[in-house]
Image: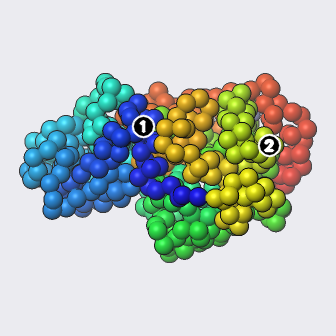
């Protein structure tokens, strides 16, 4: 099986994002971006984050000609291509085409690092959108403002303290989880946190997972994160397996941070009865969604938000047909020993030992070439671009700050959906009600079991 390179993964995502042809997408990805930085530690930090994100999609150059130049802070552009000027203030970051240094009054108070990371995600997307210049991106506002206020935060919120205890689990160790841990690096966090994922690092992860590099290929994702993320702050305890098996081992899990890429797995996490769930997801390359719940509640649970939809089965059926297995096999999400053998018999290029423990979605992505994936139910199998997964992870970290310090749980907004290509706005936060036909919370027996498991802590 030919592994899917970072370029191919990005290419497919761009084709879908901009509605352009494969070859054109490949050409756009060869765009060279230079980052020119003005004085000040906030500008320097902003440049480092933007570079980390952009390097996973475009070429970031230092001393050679550039097609696009990002000028952060008060500096004169040094290249001749398109210029995107960036102004960093204590509570916002603004970017616009053209050199914007005249607007820069200098940063008096240091902006929170997490705000800069969120702004860097949007800036990376903005650079990609500007480089591609497709109709899909018309009407994106300029100047583009990312402010703490529109995200619902003020300066002090970012300095809140979070202590993880070992009854919390990060579910999933992919792009969103990487972004979440990357965001936590700059918060006042400590303690111990489980991280579970049955999968190993593959080529197709490298376009978005900031902690993963070539040398980590084939290593369990959780082991790599435990080794590299939050050093000296939070001890990450790896569980190379599914959430279900970790719950079995622990007895119960109080809080789950869900970052997996499947609606079905989200519902299965709810079914394992955590008391609290904080969730972040991406819908291909068009949307980032953050959700949280604390039981008992009369508002939506995770299974209400990710209720079964017909498109889900259509997509699973499509994958089953393409790979020559049963729908039931695909619905298990992860390829077990028996199915790996079956797949290897059907597809001579596959080696059972290598695909065991990987997700059907990932295998499907790897087996399809550019252009064959882009219509109908398969579209959701596309990997998001790096800045989108990392934005989802950063917003999950913000949600955690809000969740830990909320003083009421009645009718507070529990859901936020944002377009990663456009500035965040206040109307994104919503209150989602429970679904009357939810497979979890509409059933009295689910509530009974939850109440039994948590009887010592529930009112
Ligand atoms: Zn529900």
Provide the secondary structure element on which disc 1 rests: helix
Give the numbered dot on residue 135: none
Q: Residue at x 91, y 38 (%)?
A: 445
- On screen, 230 above or below 346? below
**Residue 291 percent across, percent down from the top left:** 60, 39
- On screen, 3 above or below 118? below
- Residue tagged 2: 326
The reply, left or right, for residue 29 in relation to residue 294 is left
Q: Residue at x 14, y 54 (%)?
A: 65
Q: Residue at x 63, y 52 (%)?
A: 363
Indicate yes or no: mark 1 CB to ligand 1 under 8 Å.
no
Residue 31 in view: yes
- Residue tagged 1: 15
**Residue 410 percent across, percent down from the top left:** 66, 33
Q: Quadrant of residue 299?
A: top right
Q: Which numbered disc, 1 or 2, marks the residue that appears first in the sequence?
A: 1
Which one is nearer the viewer's eye here, 276 or 350?
350
Quarter of the image containing the N terminus?
A: bottom right
Q: Quadrant of residue 432?
A: top right
Report how far apart the C-alphas of labels 1 and 2 lie in the structure: 30 Å
The reply, left or right, for residue 315 in relation to residue 371 is right
- On screen, 262 above or below 187? above
Which one is nearer the viewer's eye here, 68 or 319?
319
Indicate yes or no: mark 2 CB to ligand 1 under 8 Å.
no
**Residue 220 percent across, percent down from the top left:** 62, 68
């Amino acid at each position: 099986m030919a592994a899917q390179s970072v370029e191919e993964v990005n290419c497919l995502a761009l084709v879908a994002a901009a509605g352009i042809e494969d070859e054109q997408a490949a050409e756009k990805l060869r765009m060279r971006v230079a980052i020119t930085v003005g004085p000040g530690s906030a500008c320097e930090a902003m440049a480092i984050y933007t570079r980390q994100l952009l390097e996973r999609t475009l070429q970031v150059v230092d001393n050679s000609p550039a097609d696009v130049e990002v000028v952060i802070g008060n500096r004169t552009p040094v290249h001749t291509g398109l210029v995107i000027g960036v102004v960093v203030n204590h509570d916002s970051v603004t970017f616009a085409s053209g050199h914007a240094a005249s607007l820069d009054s200098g940063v008096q108070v240091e902006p929170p690092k997490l705000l800069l990371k969120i702004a860097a995600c949007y800036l990376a997307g903005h650079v990609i959108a500007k480089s591609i210049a497709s109709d899909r991106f018309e009407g994106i506002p300029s100047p583009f403002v990312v402010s703490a206020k529109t995200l619902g935060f003020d300066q002090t919120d970012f300095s809140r303290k979070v202590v993880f205890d070992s009854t919390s689990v990060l579910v999933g160790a992919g792009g969103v989880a990487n972004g979440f841990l990357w965001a936590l690096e700059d918060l006042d966090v400590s303690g111990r946190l489980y991280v579970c994922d049955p999968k190993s690092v593959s080529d197709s992860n490298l376009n978005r997972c900031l902690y993963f590099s070539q040398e980590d290929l084939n290593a369990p994702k959780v082991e790599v994160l435990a080794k590299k993320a939050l050093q000296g702050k939070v001890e990450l305890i790896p569980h190379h397996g599914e959430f279900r098996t970790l719950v079995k081992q622990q007895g119960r899990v109080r809080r789950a941070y869900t970052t997996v890429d499947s609606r079905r797995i989200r519902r299965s996490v709810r079914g394992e009865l955590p008391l609290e769930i904080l969730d972040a997801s991406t819908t291909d390359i068009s949307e980032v969604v953050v959700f949280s719940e604390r039981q008992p509640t009369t508002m939506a649970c995770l299974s209400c938000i990710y209720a079964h939809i017909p498109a889900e089965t259509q997509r699973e059926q499509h994958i089953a047909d393409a790979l020559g297995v049963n729908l039931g096999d695909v619905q298990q999400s992860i390829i077990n020993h028996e199915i790996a053998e079956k797949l290897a018999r059907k597809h001579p290029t596959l080696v059972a030992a290598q695909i065991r423990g990987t997700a059907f979605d990932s295998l499907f992505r790897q087996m399809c070439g550019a252009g064959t994936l882009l219509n109908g139910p398969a579209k959701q199998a596309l990997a998001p671009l790096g800045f989108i997964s990392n934005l989802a992870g950063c917003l999950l970290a913000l949600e955690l700050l809000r969740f830990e310090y909320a003083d009421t749980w009645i009718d507070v907004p529990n859901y936020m959906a944002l377009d990663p290509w456009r500035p965040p706005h206040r109307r994104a936060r919503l209150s989602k009600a429970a679904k009357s036909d939810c497979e979890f919370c509409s059933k009295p027996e689910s509530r009974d079991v939850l109440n039994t498991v948590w009887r010592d802590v529930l009112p």
